[in-house]
Amino acid sequence: MYVTIVPEGQLEDDALRQLIAHSCPEIVIMESLLIRKNPNRETKAPGRDSIRLNAKRYRNAAEKGGISFILLCDLESNYTCAPELLADWSLAVPMPDKFIFNIAVRSTEAWLMADQEKIAQFLSVSSARIPTKPDEIDQPKKTLIGIARQSSDAGIRKAFMPQPKREVGFGYIECMRDYIQNHWRIDNAADASPSLSRALDRLRQIDRPPQNEPNA
């Protein structure tokens, strides 16, 4: 089965690839809309605003054109729950079976912190510093950066340290991509993150009849 993935950003792209490989390895990612290929260059897209503007188009393409789309974006603090986001974005349920919209509560960083043991090892901090219920954190990204700044590893502290006009350090993305690709244990994380667990369930049922439940 071939799919197009639509991640909010680079970490979502990496996380979605890992989730798909882990839960449904028969799926082949044909394209990621994070990268826009122009004649002379590649540009990064789509970002949250682009997903919001185009989600209905992807849904219609999945429903009428038979193209499979798997999306991943963050709930963030804008909404109290996934159904509220879906209603605001005019995405009615049930969804077409070829349109899988995953929403990380409240951000992908919560899913990454949900593997408490491995993220503590990666950041060189005590596991006691890692929240046990990451889905309940209001600002998971900010929390993760705060934890990393207490690392015993100077390289981690430097990579995560916010810079002027930047909420994260210049090495943040590179470090977290390494973590996602080489350290993150998805099943362990799903035990601590209900929204991640539901995302895995949807991916494992991608060839089955559509689910009527909201996508978070």
Image: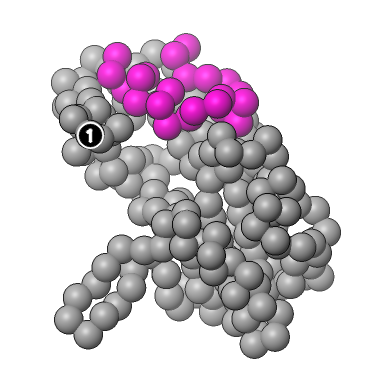
- In this rendering, is residue 128 above or below 204? above
Residue 202 in magenta stretch: no
Q: At 60% from the left edge and 31% from the top edge, which residue is drawn? A: 135
Quarter of the image for residue 96 reads bottom right
Decide whether residue 139 is among the magenta residues. yes
Using the image as rendered, state which of residue 181 and residue 58 is in the foreground.
58
Residue 176 as seen in the image, left or right of residue 64: left
- In percent of the image, x 36 and y 53: which residue is there? 10
Q: Could one spot residue 98 in this view of the protein?
A: yes
Indicate whether 12 appears above or below 153: below
Image coordinates for residue 165, horizontal then vertical, percent: 22, 34
At horizontal 58% and vertical 38% (from top left) the residue drawn is 78
The residue where tag 1 is placed is: 165
Q: Helix or strand or loop: what does disc 1 sit on?
A: loop
Residue 122 percent location from the top left of the image: 33, 29
State the extent of the magenta-drawn residues as a range.
128-150
The type of colouring in the image is: one colour
**Three-letter residue code for mark 1:** Lys
Magenta stretch, main secondary structure class: helix
x 43%, y 23%: residue: 143
Q: Position of residue 50 (x, y in %)?
A: 46, 62
Above or below 73: residue 116: above
In the depicted structure, whether residue 178 falls above or below residue 98: above
